[in-house]
Amino acid sequence: MAENAAEVVVGGLVIAAAAGFVLFAAQATGFAKRSGGTYPLVASFRSIEGINVGTDVKLAGVKIGTISNIALNPKTYFADATIQVKDGVALPTDSAILISQDGLLGGSYVEVVPGGAPDNLKPGERITDTQGAVSLITLLMKFVGGQSGSGGSAASGANGAAKP
């Protein structure tokens, strides 16, 4: 009989631990919405490559929020991202927002660069100064392939001007 009681207790502890892991995973991924504590801001990006719902939003390297929604704007063809910023973090109206990376092979995150305006963004307002993701492949292709530059066009322009 003592053996059955021990099995029941161990089984209960395993179930409690599993429930704790599920709850932690739901909160960490943003699946379980936390009520209050944040306010929304919107930003439009030309490219949000590497950014998903749940991506961290940082200010001076400190997490101040997360991306809660991403949608394509059918009028501008830009990606509209909704950012949930922690209450108590006031961002000036001229703040900039950009997509950055944690090193060459690191993950992407959204970085906020505060401005100097005396007024702060209100919930639901739009951050207008944005910079989308920079494609590493595009940068490498420009570096490796080189660019023709303006030297070739100036020479052909001079030759064209000399002909009657």
Image (tube, grey):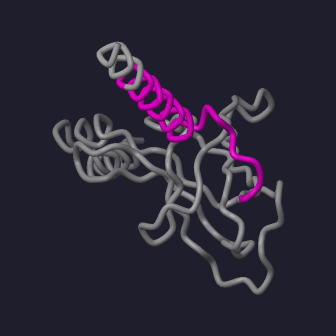
Magenta stretch: helix, strand or loop mostly: helix
Q: Position of residue 22 (x, y in %)?
A: 49, 28
Instruction: Determine if the magenta segment contains residue 30.
Output: yes
Question: At 38% across and 25% down in the image, what residue appears?
Answer: 14
Front-most of residues 72 and 138: 72
Q: Position of residue 105 (x, y in %)?
A: 23, 42
Q: Is residue 103 left or right of residue 31?
A: left
Q: Is residue 121 left or right of residue 5?
A: right
Q: Is residue 52 left or right of residue 162?
A: right
- Compared with residue 85, is residue 53 higher up or lower down, i.e. above or below? above
**Image quarter of residue 1:** top left
Front-most of residues 43 and 149: 43
Front-most of residues 17 and 12: 12
Question: At 50% across and 53% down in the image, what residue appears?
Answer: 110
Q: Is residue 78 left or right of residue 156?
A: right
Quadrant containing the C terminus is top left
- The magenta stretch is 10-37
- Compared with residue 9, is residue 82 higher up or lower down, i.e. above or below? below
Q: Specify the farthest residue to the front.
A: 1
- Compared with residue 158, is residue 17 higher up or lower down, i.e. above or below? above
Question: At 53% across and 55% down in the image, what residue appears?
Answer: 57
